[in-house]
Amino acid sequence: MFGSCNLDKFLGYAVSFGLIVLCDETAFAKSKFAIFDPPGSVGTFAYSISNNGMAAGDYDDGTMLHGFVRLADGTITSFDPPESTKTFTFEINTEGTATGAYFAGGMYHGYVRAADGTITSFDPPESKDTFSESINDDGTAAGYYCTGGNCEDGFGVAHGFVRAPDGTITSLDVPFTLLTVGQSINSKGTVTGYCDAGFGPSGFVRTADGEFTTFDPKNSSGTYAYDINDKGAATGFYYSESGLTLHGFVRTSDGKITKFDPLASGATYPFGINDKGTITGSYAPKRTFGSHGFIRAADGTITTFDPHGSTYTAPEGINRKGAIAGFFEDSNNITHGFVRSP
């Protein structure tokens, strides 16, 4: 997919889990970036891209956040659930159904927006805040909600959930834990996220039949899983035992965990993985400011990238073809959405 690295364009280094090769994007044929902003935007944030090239996210018009969907041809549609004063859009599936959260009446509510624009809001029973983080191609959504108080205030207790296309909501709580946060659901209904039993966060996967498995990379003092592909491989990041460094990881469906970091990374944030095992996210270099994008191929090859003029790059989602959606900040501190074609 990425070709091979020119000898004068890469550095390789061996670590305990194997050899990682870091390649600058200039070693490859130039990738194409589509930079975009909905009309009136003063800050655009793209979080997801479907397998057929639709992107979704939200944008700031200077007064509030609105959701948007961007079709593969570049057409952008903005939207807000009724009475919303702040709309977040976290994921879109191949049917064009998007999901996210919006603020109204003193709390966040979950919603799904169909391709025809129909918006359905929902909240699990007793929820004080609901965040719908992910939706698969069947239209099943997953996320988390808080009871006893608002999530953002820190007084609520977080529970995961799965919402079926017919509206049925099932709560998810990892046994013997104090909180459960669902982050991603794949086509088989397997959910990943993180939980906490009072000793620091751990990652978890929950199969469609309700079986939970928790996990932590070796020497982790806090594990956060953010995405899972249809083969059951999950990615995210974890704090080192000292709590001072963040590393990326990928966990295969059989439980094997591999740590990784772009060269000179002081903090690695993987957020998306596709069915080929290609991962995208961002990293912050040691002793410098800013953030750069990266792609990690299934063989461990890491490629870094930034849209032209970026001072802060944040890739968020990757589709089956390797197209990436995210956002970046320019020298004027304005944030723009982008889609990077492979």
Image (spheres, rainbow, N blue to C red):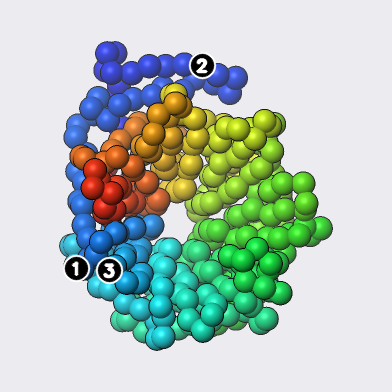
In this picture, residue 187 sits left or right of residue 251: left
Q: Residue at x 77, y 57 (%)?
A: 177
Residue 173 appearing in the image: yes
3 or 1: tag closer to the N-terminus:
1
> As displayed, is residue 51 above or below residue 27?
below
Q: Is residue 44 left or right of residue 217?
A: left
Residue at the extreme top: 7
Secondary-structure class at tag 2: strand
Q: Which mark is residue 61?
A: 3
Q: Amino acid at mark 3?
A: Asp
Q: For residue 252, which quarter of the picture? A: top right
The image quarter containing residue 37 is bottom left
- Please name the residue shown 53% across and 58% down the image: 184
Q: Quadrant of the N terminus?
A: top left
Residue receiving disc 1: 39
Q: Which residue is mark 2?
A: 14
In this view, the mark in front (2 or 1) = 1
Mark 2 residue type: Ala
- Residue 259, percent from left and from top: 57, 31
Q: Where does residue 331 sit, x and y in percent of width and height?
A: 24, 43
Give the distance between the C-alpha atoms of the residues marked 3 and 2, in whole angstroms: 46 Å
Q: Is residue 171 left or right of residue 111?
A: right
